[in-house]
Each structure stands twice: as structure tokens, then as C-alpha cells.
Amino acid sequence: MADNESVIITVVYGASEVIDCRNLWITLETLAQQCSDIPWMVGGDFNAVRDLNEVCGISGNIRMATEEFNAGILEAGLIPLPMQGEWFTWHNCSSSMRSLWKRLDRILINDRWLARFPSAYYHSLTPRTSDHSPLNIWHHEIVGIPMYAVTRKLKALKPVFRLQRRNKGDLTMNVQLAKGFLDEAQQLRRVMRRILQINDENGFRHTDLGEVAHEFVSYYQNLLGGTRRRLSVDIRYLRPWARHSITDEEANQLLLPLSADDVKQAMFDIADDKAPGPDGYSSRFFKAAWPVVGEEVTRAVLDFFSTGKLLKIPE
């Protein structure tokens, strides 16, 4: 940013009552007129949510507060700054059925800020439930190869996350119920997709489940271990059917060493809903915490491709 360039940052701490919040929305509308030609950022605790997906738990009627909040933002010409990290930013610290989570904290910007800082974003950390935050745990120094350091820190994070889950009250129970329903649905799907009969290579039909399984095993034994495996194939006969043959340049590209960008792209290409690995951490965790853990995870991955050493998965 140039020395003579100015920006305006407004810090917000919203009132808890709807009628008092109206003064804040009016103030933001007034400030917007003064900041129309200057990059402007507004952030803090607005004490209001924008829609129902920003609330988890039993809450009172928030329709009027939500409508007025969205109208105030619209009139002020503010848009959300991209966010990474935790979705909910506030918890009522209850472990009972009244446990409540909300997204009350956020950062908004005007179009001038977006034009001047198009790649800016902010990171929302987990609401504190103990004296140790995930950020502090991750920054502890651990002696060892990069992959060992990452696995030790991931293991150290688990007690913190378990405590947070307990403080979220009945959310854990809901997750277990959902898993139960999913298991039943998957079991039903397996039953529906079961093969009840099969014809062998001579055309005879088999309906006994044991015979069906035997025919499958027999087929693949012949396919993978039969005489066909010993037949040589001239690759030249396959070329007319090949859609694309790589050039020498493309082949050389495949041999290039991995970069940090390659590691990040591979991680972010994994869908959020993919099953977690043996350590219990899904790709969604690493994406959300990438500003904190990305550098060390990348170093561990690159170290593996350089040395070929992989830690044994603990039993």
C-alpha cells in the first residue's frame, strides 16, 4: 500500500437488544456515505446473525433482528470478507439442552476495499473453551522429522476438540443418531444391490449364494492368473485406439519434483465430505486450518516424497 493511501477500519461491538442495534445500522449507513471513495472495513461482534444457518441450538425469535441486520448491511453497501476457520463464533457455555452456538462475529467490507485488496480474507478461530487454543498447541516445538512433528501435534489437538464437543451439549448425540440412520441406509443399499444369481461360462445358472461367490472367485482367478497373463502384447497395435499419447515434454513434466503449491492443490481438491483418515482428521479440517497448519503439513508431505520414509500407523 502506498504511503499516502488511506483506509478506514471500524470496530463494532453490537448491543444485545434489537431496538438498540438499530442505532448501529443507522450509524453504518451514515459512515458509508463518508467512506464511499475509501477502502472501508467493518468488523467485530455484531450480536446478530444473517440467517438461520448461523444458529445451532434453541434460540428465540430472531426474524426481525435478522431482517434489520441484512437491511442495514445492504443500505451501507457492505459485503462479507471471505472467511476461513470456524463457522460459529459464540457459545453460551452450556452443556445442557439449552446449548447454543451462533455466528455473531464477522468482517464486512465495501467495494473499494475489495478492489484494493481482492485476495484479502480473515481466519475465525475456535471460541475458547480452555486455556489452550489449537493455535498455541500447533506452534509448540517438536523435535523430529516433519511427518512426526505433524502427527504429534494432531494427536495433541484431540483432547481440545473432545472438550469442545462435550461443551456443545447434545450435538454429539445428534451426530451418533445420524450415523445410525446412515448405517441402516447403507445396509439396506447393500441388501438391495446383492447379486442373487449368476451364469457361469457354460451358461448354467447358479442361485446358491455360496455358488455365486465361487463363480466370482473362479472368474477373476482365470482372468488374472490364467494363460492370458503370459501372452505378450505389442503396444503398437493399441496406438490406433489411444485417444492421446503423451509427448516427451509431458512425460518430463510428470517427473518434476512436487512443489508446495502442488501439495496445497491436492489437499483442496479433496471433497469436504470424504471419510477421515486413521487419525480422525478429514480434509475439511486441514482446509479450514491451512493458514495455521499448512506450512508444516506441506513440509511433511514433501519430506516423504524426498526420502520415501512413511511413519507406521499406530495400532
Image (spheres, grey):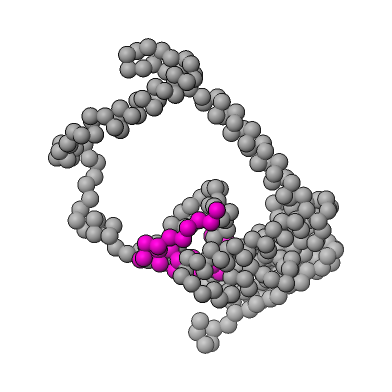
Could you tell me if residue 263 is visible in this image?
no
Residue 266 in the image: above or below residue 136: above
Residue 46's spot in the image, x, y percent? 74, 66
> Whole-percent x and y of residue 4?
53, 87
Identity of the residue drawn at 17% across and 36% down: 232
Is 247 a magenta residue? Answer: no
Q: Residue furthest toward the top?
A: 204
Comparing 171 with 313, the one in front is: 313
Instruction: Find residue 261 and report its horizontal and vertical position in percent.
Output: 41, 65
* Residue 10 horizontal/vertical position (percent): 68, 76
Instruction: State left or right for residue 258 relative to residue 281.
Output: left
65 or 249, which lies in front? 249
Which quadrant of the view contains residue 136?
Answer: bottom right
Position of 219 relative to 50 (above/below): above
| Residue found at the far bottom of this picture | 3
Boundaries of the magenta span: 287-315
Q: Residue at x 36, y 25 (%)?
A: 218
Q: Quadrant of residue 74?
A: bottom right
Q: Is residue 27 left or right of residue 42?
A: right
Residue occupying the point 80% across, 61% down: 92
Q: Is residue 303 magenta?
A: yes
Q: Main secondary structure of the magenta part?
A: helix
Compared across the picture, whether 149 is left or right of 57 comes to left
Q: Quadrant of residue 6?
A: bottom right
In the rendered structure, the answer to whether residue 194 lies left or right of residue 98 reads left
